[in-house]
Amino acid sequence: MDRYEPALAYAPQYLETEKDQQQAHPALLATQSVAMGHVLDRVTSIAASESTTLITGESGTGKGVIARLIHQRSTRARSPFVSVNCAGLPEGVLESELFGHERGAFTGAVRQRPGRFEQARDGTIFLDEIGSADARVQQRLLRVLQDRCFERVGGTQTLVNEARVVAATNVDLQAEVEAGRFREDLYYRLHVVPVEVPPLRERREDITHLVEHFLLPVVDRIDGITREALDRLVDYPWPGNIRELENTIERMVVLAKTRRLGLGDVPDEIHHWRAGDGAHRMTDLGSISYREAREWFDRQFLHRALQRHQGVVTHVADAIGMSRKNLYCRLTRLGIDPDRFRPGH
């Protein structure tokens, strides 16, 4: 089979333009996290430049949201934002989708077709999961970044690229370079201005806000979430990050038997991860960092103190020997709302 033949059938479902996603979900960018605050500050600086940007971070952390935000805050905001999931296309198809093809370039190419770089014009092209690009595509991307030009598949006319390139990956590209799976010269061309999006477990103070955001569309059916259920969500490490949290909230809403989400609505895997007496979690301490272990202890300690003093921060501060200011800072960092521990809340 011709290596480009599947292009016309596969491509549309993996491609996204600014028309599909008009805004970078502003609610997801509201943060109390110092780490995420640094990312947003960096985004502002990046948007004001024309530099190629590489966004790194675990799957589900919101790298696409950051890419869209860079575009929207840049001077290119009125031009197209074109997103391509490099991992979502079979081998051989990505090249045609990015650079276009001429009529007769391969079986099924009955007419000339512009690629995504052409469609982006003078806007932004976002190459998600760039680590999945095959060697041929990597070579052609290197030329685009070096010389700002390319040809369509099967063509000889040289076209000029005016789009800004923003790429993202959830794999260690340096390790891929060392393993011979990713071009070192392309890596350095992409890595001009890097930005790393922190995982949700490192910005737990944002979980409460995110839960509230994900519940907004169902406010007519769900009145909110209990303190106990929210505590479980805040304490969970979320390996799938924001995407997993969003899917979890959707599942809880769909299966809810009352108008207020409670402990009974929290999925079993989250219950099982954190046993009632904490013993199960303690067996996992050997596989986590000192910082994560300390954070877990702080959260458990402050939960119990707030429960004992019914959410009165002044009383808690006096009891544990900490200033109110420092206690408030610690609670904010851990994503703990003391008001949820008050009677009747």
Image: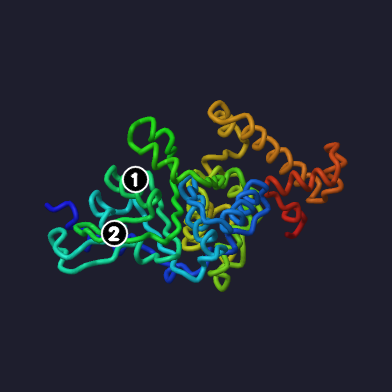
Horizontal and vertical percent position of residue 331: 73, 47
Q: Can residue 269 be seen in this view?
A: no
Which residue bears the numbered disc 2? 158
Horizontal and vertical percent position of residue 279: 59, 32
**As drawn, is 181 to the left or to the right of 245?**
left
**As drawn, is 329 to the left or to the right of 163?**
right
| Label ID, residue 311 | none
Query: Which one is in front, 301 or 261?
Result: 301
Q: Residue 120, relative to residue 197: is it above or below? A: below
Query: Which one is in front, 27 or 271?
Result: 27
Which residue bears the numbered disc 1? 132
Q: Which circle's residue, 1 or 2, is located before the other in the chain?
A: 1
Q: In terms of image quadrants, where is residue 281?
A: top right
Say which residue appears at 27% left-offset and 57% top-offset. 151
Mark 1 and mark 2 residues within 8 Å of each other at the beta carbon? no
Label 1, residues with CA under 10 Å away: few <14, some 14-19, many ≥20: some
Q: Is residue 237 visible?
A: yes
Q: In terms of image quadrants, where is residue 288?
A: top right
SS state under label 2: strand
Q: Residue 148, relative to residue 218: is it above or below? A: above
Q: In terms of image quadrants, where is residue 304?
A: top right
Where the C terminus falls, by quadrant?
Answer: bottom right
Query: Which one is in front, 166 or 282?
Result: 166
Query: Which one is in front, 224 or 245?
Result: 245
* Distance between mark 1 and mark 2 Cα atoms: 26 Å
Horizontal and vertical percent position of residue 210: 59, 58
Q: Label 1 is placed on what type of residue?
A: Ser
Q: Label 2 is placed on what type of residue?
A: Thr
Horizontal and vertical percent position of residue 155: 21, 59
